[in-house]
Structures are given as structure tokens and as C-alpha cells.
Image: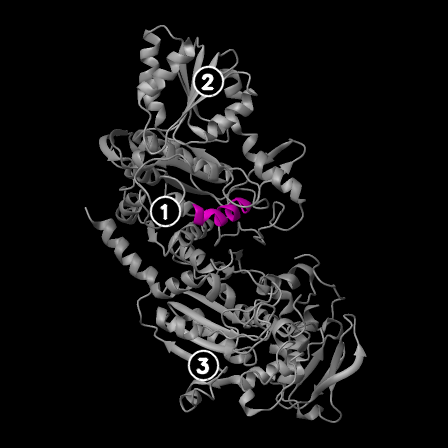
């Protein structure tokens, strides 16, 4: 007896970021959550411990992060949409399992509520976008992941549904890069009616063709076919689930080189469908700001003021932070005098990617901040210096 | 899985259970890849025999295999059982996820002594604490076999291995006491030299609602037997034993060293030194099983307005 | 298909698939009546294959302990009906 408590009635709510993400997961069809309390992502498991049971799902607080990510893998194998939420130290424990899940293409979503840097002490409720360095290569071996970066609670709700859709279609680890401030931010959000949400969600079903269970390269089409995820308890399950280079049946029969190509290219070739970006006043620009996550909100204000002063500046915002959209960025920064990259970390992970793409022809100015958000004046000062 | 082993002409009438094993089902006639004298071939045979005789619905009993020599059991177990390879030690956590996402399933876990008490100890303890409905086999050959014979948490006192060249001196984990303390509701230990009791325990565990822990003492001739005397731990009787370099001598050593529970009550600790106590240690069928209790709470949550 | 023992009264036969044997001698150790011993004949896997001791064939009770404990599943006991069923099938 499925009650309809899964979807909140349509309307405006004031919600905490973590809770909005949890509600987004419920709307996306979540039925298993395995987690472990860690500041600042504890509110997710607290909220789901109540809400997930109301919809007939199960929410398990496991003995450690290793247990929770492995429980998520077990649940996803059995056909349940599963996710976990953790922070930096928990993610470091989950890395081996993420690598195994990427090899066997087991879909799951991981919400990483990032907190300050290495180690486990320090101000744990301060944001620090440092996990992107780890998430891009989360685990031994070569594979590709998808990382989405929301900037407000409304996007935490919407992007979680997108994250589950990416996980189901591309069968790779999908991360939601929230952080301590965004996770604890209370903001009004609008939840659409149930009928509209249902149209957005891709459900887990069995395919018609039971012969192919893992991704493979189709030579006559020249592309990569990603079949639906196999489910234990049904006939649609491979003979072997070996974590070694395997063909579409799970048996060893593919060269390791080709297997790595499949794991990476199956995402890279679909980059136009995966890459979500946003633009703000980019029609005629001399200076471009490339940013993601919370810093973007300060940029809006700075750009408005700068535009009044006659400076041609605009924002190119990355919502899908990884894989990095090389082509789009090339087009945006073609005839631009300078690029400003405000990031909530010191090394500037996205700044590095921009340097790689532009091959250093245009100057790139980083505005690093750790644990403290960018103030619009910080960005405005840099815009004014550059525009001289 | 490299090298599927030599394939022989099909002999009539063949072993009744070869065609049910995965290798036999695929290639018709197949043998295991284990070292001569290993106990895992026996366990694969018993698993296939019970799977076939019990006529159980194979899809409801997913098999989760940890990391160790027993991963080769995948070609010996029943061909209809759905097999999943978990990471080293994480099989109990994967089983928890599977059980909670689909309560109709009852996962069966193959785990080794290093896999379960070493790296996966925390997950094993918490799975037993929750009394999750599943069966966990712990193959105790008191050595890390796959990586070449290192000392395991259950290596006997005075044993030689590649990482204890000067005799093992640490205390060893007693799996059964660990499971008793953690709260599993059906705990038994048997050895490969008593195959019928292993089958009896496995059938009972399949019907038992709750965590069934079955520790199986298996011989590892290549890395444990060849290096240790069969008088291991009873040197005080000053009988000089000889190396257990074939499975016959090792099986005799296991039979000699395994003591039944009732008999162990009357033996002093010194006599029980380096011995395995076999039998059923706990059987509480009426203890609440985790997923059933969880379903009750789910019902309350779903009815609440 | 070498029949090790053909027991007419109890109507069972002990079979041995010579080529599959790995020479681990588990059956020799586990046989309660101890009627098996190593033969000096090498098989496809370069291992010595078990054989019945002289005149000890009648002590075999068909308890299947050797069948359970064989890692390569090559020694096994078949009842009369099973043999007919097997032949009828193939």
C-alpha cells in the first residue's frame, strides 16, 4: 500500500539545504539510504530516518562510512534507488567502494557536504570546496564521475532529481557538491506539483534485451551503449560480477585498455547531455567570471554594480562541475581580455581546468577563499583592477 | 579466473552434482582450481548439493563472496545462485543493504577468517548485533591463503607463516565467542572433516530467521600445513610431529584437534590449548529478526497522519 | 569409467573419475574403514590416483564420506536406480 507521502504538496516552503536535498532524493524515488552521522551532513540522515520510512523505504544508520556506502551498493544491486550523504573525512573512507562501484557500473548518488580541509578537527561548519580534487579521481583505477554543484536550496532539491537521473542513465558515481553553509542555509523553495515532478524522474525498470548487462563499445555505431542496471532477484543479472575488465556479460573478455576507454568515454561522449551550465549577462563581455556553487551568488551583485560603471563583465556558471565542459568554456572565453575564477579553495581546481583549456592565452585571476564566503566587494575590486 | 582448468571428455555416469555447478553447467565437465588438499572444494560441493536438494528458489538467496581463495568457489557453487563479489571484508555491509532494500532476499555470505575477523570485523559485529536475516560462512584456515600464507587473526599459537617466521605469539580471535558477544542468534562451528554436520547446519541456517554464523575449519595445506608440525600447540607432550604436507595428515590433525562442546566442558584450558570446539553454540529462533522489526516500524510510520 | 567397487547386495557402485583427481588424498584419510590407498598410476593431472586395498572392497558401506570430502568431485557413489536414470537420460 503505497501512500502518497513521498511528494510534499505543491507550494512554497522554508527549508534547510540538507533537508531540501533529502526531499529532492525522495521526489526522485529514493528507497534506501545508508549513512553515518558526520557534521555538517547529519541533518540528511536525521530527516530521512523519519521521512523515508513514511514512504516504505528503509534508512540505515550503519556502523561507519564504509558500511554505509557498501550498504548503498547492496541496495542499488537489488533494484533500489540508493544514496548516502557524508563530508570530507567520510568520503575518504568511501573511496575504495566508489572505485568498485564504478567498475561494476552500480548507480548511486553521494551528497558530499564539504567542510574545512585535511584532518578532522577545525571549524567543521565552515565551507571549503576542497573535495573536488578527490572526487574527480575518487578511487584507484581510471573512471569518470559526474559532480553537480548547486548554489541554493531550490537547486539542492532540483539537482538531486537530476543526479539520480544521471546515475540511472550513465551508471557512474554521481556527487552533489554541497557545503557546510549551503547545507545549513534556510531558504524559501518552491516544490512543484507531483505530476510535474514525476515527468522529470527516470525510474528503475528491467530492459527488453536481457543479454547485455554492462556498457560496451558498439563498433558499427561507433558509440558506447549503456544498458540498464542489472537487478539481483530477477533474471536480468550477469553470470559473474568480477571487478576486472569485463565484457557486457561480466566475463573477462575485454582488454584493460578498452575497458578504461569504455568507462571514461561513455561519459565524455555524452558531455553535452550531462553538462548543465548557466550564463548571466554574457552577450558582449571583455571579462568573464567562471565559478560554481555559493561564490556565484556574490558574483551576481558584483557584476550588476560593474555593469552600471560601464565594465563589460558576465558570469559563466558551472552547474555540472565535472566532467569539465571544455568546448563550452572555449567558446565563452574566445575573445575575452581576462578570466576571473573565484573559488572556495586555495589551489583553484576549476582555474586549473580553465588554464588547460585556454592554454594561458588570456590571463586568469584566482580569488581564493577558504572557510569564508566571497564578499561582492572582493570580486568588484578585482573586476575594477582588471578593467583598467 | 584465468585458465579454466583442463577440460576432460564427459564420463558416463558422471558425478551427479557436476552439471549443477557453474563450471559444470557451462563446460559440462569441470574440476576446481584449488591447491591439492584445500577444503574449499568440499564446501563448494556441499553448497551445491544443499542448493540442489533443498529445491529452494535460487533468486531469493544471493551469494556474496568476499576476497580470498574462496572466490574460486564461484565456479563450483550452484549455477542458478546469483553471485556478487564484495570488497575485502565488506560483505556483511553489502548484505545489510541488500536485505533492507528487498526484505524477501536472504543473502548468503562466503567470508574467510582474515576477511571476517580481520578487515571486516566491524561490519561482522554490527551485522550480528542487528540479527539481520542472513547466513555467513567463515572459512577458518588460520592463514591468509590468497596472498601467500601470512598470519591471520586466527593463526594458532606457535604456528609458522611468512609474517611470523619466529612462531606466532599473538592471541587468536575465537570467532564463535565474538559472534556470541555480538548477538547472532544461530552460531555453530564445524570442520571440513565433518561434511554431514556442515550440511545439517547449512540446512538449519537456511530456515533460521536471523543471523546464522557457521565457522568452518578448513585445511590450507600449501601455506599452513607444509610449514607446521601436526603436534602444533601440544608440544608439552614432547612428541615430535611431522610436517602436515598432505591433506590426509592435516585432516587427521583437524579431527584430533576438534573437540565437541559437551566434551570440552570437562577439559582444562591446557588440554583445550590450540583446539577447536565444534558444535552448535547458540540457537534462538524466536529472537526478533531485524527486517521484521523494521517492517513494523515502517507500518507505524506509513499510517501516521 | 573404472568402477572401484561393485556391491551387488547393497546395490551401490563406487566410481572414480581418474583424470579429474588432483591427488590430494583426502578420501584416503577420511574413509572410516580405511580401504583406500595410493596407486602408482599417474593421471592427466600428473597425480597419483587412489585405489582399493587388496581384498578390502567388501568393507565399503557406501557412506559417501569420500564423495563429500573430495574437492574435485571425482569419487562418488551411485545407487542402482540412479545409474539407470543416468543411462536413460543420456
Residue density around tag 2, few if under 14, some if 14–19, many if 20 or more, within 10 Å: many
The magenta segment is A92-105
Q: Which residue corresponds to the image point at 26% horizontal and 33% vertical from the top-left?
A: A185
Nearer to me, B139 or C41:
B139
Expressed as whole percent of the image width and height from the top left, the position of residue A226 reads 55, 38
Q: Tell whether B31 sits left or right of B251.
A: right
Q: Earlier in the sequence, mark 2 or mark 1?
A: 1
Nearer to me, B54 or B274:
B274
Does residue A168 show up?
no
Discs 3 and 2 share one subunit: no
Judge depth for marks 1 and 3 and give the one in front: 1
Q: Residue furthest top?
A: A310
Real-space Cα separation, disc 3 to disc 2, in angstroms: 73 Å
In the rendered view of the protein, which quadrant contains the N terminus of chain B? bottom right
Residue B150, picture quadrant: bottom right
Real-space Cα separation, disc 2 to disc 1, in angstroms: 34 Å
Residue density around tag 3, few if under 14, some if 14–19, many if 20 or more, within 10 Å: many
**Looking at the image, is A117 positioned above or below residue B143?**
above
Residue C20, picture quadrant: bottom right
Expressed as whole percent of the image width and height from the top left, the position of residue A31 reads 36, 46
Q: Which mark is residue A120?
A: 1
Expressed as whole percent of the image width and height from the top left, the position of residue A379 reads 36, 19
**Magenta stretch mostly in which secondary structure?**
helix
Find out whether residue A98 is within the magenta segment: yes
Q: Which mark is residue B279?
A: 3
Judge depth for marks 3 and 2 and give the one in front: 2
Real-space Cα separation, disc 1 to disc 3, in angstroms: 46 Å
Instruction: Give the colour scheme of this rendering.
Output: one colour
Discs 1 and 3 share one subunit: no
Chain identity of mark 1: A
Residue density around tag 1, few if under 14, some if 14–19, many if 20 or more, within 10 Å: few
Amino acid at each position: 500500500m503505497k501512500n502518497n507521502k513521498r511528494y510534499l504538496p505543491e507550494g512554497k516552503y522554508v527549508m534547510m539545504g540538507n533537508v531540501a536535498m533529502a526531499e529532492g532524493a525522495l521526489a526522485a524515488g529514493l528507497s534506501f539510504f545508508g549513512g553515518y552521522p558526520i557534521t555538517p551532513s547529519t541533518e540528511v540522515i536525521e530527516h530521512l530516518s523519519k521521512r523515508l520510512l513514511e514512504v516504505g523505504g528503509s534508512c540505515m544508520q550503519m556502523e561507519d562510512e564504509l558500511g554505509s556506502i557498501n550498504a548503498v551498493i547492496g541496495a542499488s544491486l537489488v533494484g533500489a534507488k540508493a544514496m548516502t550523504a557524508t563530508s570530507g573525512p567520510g568520503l575518504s573512507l568511501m573511496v575504495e567502494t566508489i572505485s568498485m562501484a564504478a567498475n561494476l557500473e552500480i548507480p548511486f548518488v553521494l551528497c558530499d557536504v564539504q567542510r574545512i580541509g585535511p584532518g578532522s578537527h577545525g571549524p567543521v561548519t565552515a565551507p571549503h570546496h576542497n573535495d573536488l580534487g578527490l572526487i574527480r579521481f575518487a578511487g584507484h583505477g581510471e573512471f569518470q564521475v559526474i559532480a553537480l554543484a548547486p548554489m541554493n536550496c531550490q537547486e539542492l532539491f532540483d539537482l538531486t532529481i537530476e543526479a539520480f537521473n544521471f546515475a540511472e542513465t550513465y551508471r557512474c558515481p554521481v556527487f552533489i557538491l554541497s557545503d557546510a553553509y549551503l547545507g545549513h542555509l534556510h531558504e524559501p523553495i518552491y516544490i512543484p506539483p507531483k505530476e510535474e515532478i514525476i515527468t522529470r524522474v527516470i525510474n528503475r525498470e528491467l530492459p527488453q534485451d536481457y543479454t547485455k548487462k554492462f556498457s560496451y563499445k558498439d563498433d558499427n555505431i561507433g558509440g558506447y551503449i549503456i544498458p540498464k542496471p542489472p537487478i539481483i532477484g530477477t533474471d536480468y543479472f550477469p553470470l559473474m560480477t568480477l571487478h576486472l575488465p569485463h565484457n557486457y556479460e561480466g566475463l573477462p573478455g575485454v582488454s584493460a585498455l578498452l575497458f578504461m576507454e569504455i568507462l571514461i568515454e561513455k561519459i565524455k561522449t555524452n558531455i553535452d547531455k550531462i553538462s548543465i551550465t548557466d550564463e548571466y549577462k554574457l552577450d558582449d563581455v571583455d571579462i568573464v567570471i567562471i565559478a560554481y556553487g555559493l561564490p556565484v551568488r556574490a558574483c551576481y551583485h558584483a557584476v550588476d554594480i560593474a555593469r552600471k560603471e560601464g565594465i563589460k563583465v558576465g558570469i559563466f556558471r558551472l552547474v555540472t562541475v565535472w566532467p569539465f565542459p571544455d568546448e563550452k568554456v572555449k567558446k565563452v572565453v574566445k575573445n575575452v581580455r581576462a578570466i576571473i575564477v573565484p573559488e572556495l579553495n586555495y589551489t583553484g581546481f576549476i582555474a586549473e581546468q580553465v588554464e588547460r583549456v585556454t592554454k594561458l592565452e588570456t590571463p586568469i585571476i584566482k580569488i581564493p577563499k577558504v572557510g569564508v564566503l566571497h564578499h561582492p566587494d572582493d570580486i568588484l575590486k578585482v573586476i575594477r583592477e582588471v578593467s583598467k | 579466473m584465468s585458465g579454466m582448468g583442463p577440460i576432460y571428455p564427459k564420463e558416463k555416469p558422471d558425478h551427479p552434482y557436476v552439471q549443477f555447478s557453474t563450471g559444470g553447467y557451462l563446460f559440462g565437465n569441470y574440476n576446481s582450481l584449488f591447491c591439492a588438499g584445500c577444503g574449499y572444494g568440499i564446501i563448494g560441493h556441499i553448497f551445491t548439493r544443499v542448493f540442489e536438494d533443498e529445491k529452494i528458489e535460487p533468486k531469493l538467496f544471493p551469494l556474496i563472496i568476499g576476497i580470498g581463495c574462496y572466490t574460486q568457489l564461484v565456479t563450483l557453487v550452484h549455477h542458478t545462485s546469483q553471485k556478487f563479489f564484495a570488497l575485502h571484508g565488506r560483505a556483511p555491509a553489502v548484505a545489510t543493504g541488500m536485505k533492507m532494500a528487498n526484505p524477501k532476499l536472504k543473502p548468503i555470505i562466503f567470508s574467510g577468517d582474515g576477511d571476517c575477523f580481520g578487515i571486516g570485523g566491524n561490519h561482522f559485529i554490527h551485522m550480528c548485533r542487528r540479527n539481520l536475516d542472513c547466513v555467513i560462512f567463515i572459512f577458518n584456515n588460520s592463514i591468509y591463503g590468497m596472498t601467500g600464507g601470512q598470519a591471520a587473526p586466527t593463526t594458532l599459537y606457535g604456528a609458522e607463516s611468512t609474517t611470523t617466521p619466529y612462531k606466532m605469539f599473538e592471541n587468536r580471535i575465537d570467532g564463535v565467542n565474538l559472534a556470541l558477544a555480538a548477538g547472532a542468534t544461530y552460531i555453530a562451528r564445524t570442520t571440513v572433516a565433518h561434511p554431514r554436520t556442515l550440511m545439517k547446519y547449512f540446512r538449519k541456517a537456511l530456515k533460521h530467521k536471523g543471523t546464522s554464523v557457521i565457522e568452518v575449519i578448513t585445511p590450507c595445506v600449501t601455506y599452513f600445513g607444509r610449514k607446521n608440525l601436526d603436534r602444533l600447540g601440544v608440544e608439552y607432550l614432547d612428541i615430535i610431529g611431522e610436517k602436515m604436507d598432505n591433506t590426509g595428515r592435516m585432516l587427521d590433525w583437524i579431527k584430533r584437534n576438534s573437540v565437541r562442546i559437551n566434551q570440552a566442558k570437562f577439559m582444562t584450558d591446557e588440554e583445550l590449548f590450540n583446539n577447536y570446539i565444534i558444535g552448535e553454540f547458540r540457537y534462538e529462533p524466536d529472537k526478533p529478526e531485524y527486517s521484521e522489526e523494521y517492517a513494523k516500524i515502517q507500518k507505524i510510520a506509513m499510517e501516521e497522519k | 569409467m573404472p568402477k572401484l567397487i561393485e556391491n551387488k547386495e547393497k546395490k551401490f557402485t563406487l566410481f572414480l573419475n581418474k583424470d579429474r583427481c588432483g591427488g590430494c588424498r583426502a578420501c584416503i584419510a577420511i574413509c572410516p574403514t580405511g580401504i583406500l590407498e595410493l596407486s602408482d598410476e599417474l593421471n592427466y593431472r600428473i597425480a597419483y590416483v587412489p585405489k582399493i586395498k587388496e581384498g578390502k572392497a567388501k568393507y565399503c558401506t557406501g557412506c559417501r564420506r569420500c564423495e563429500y570430502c573430495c574437492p574435485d568431485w571425482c569419487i562418488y557413489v551411485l545407487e542402482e536406480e540412479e545409474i539407470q536414470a543416468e543411462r536413460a537420460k543420456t
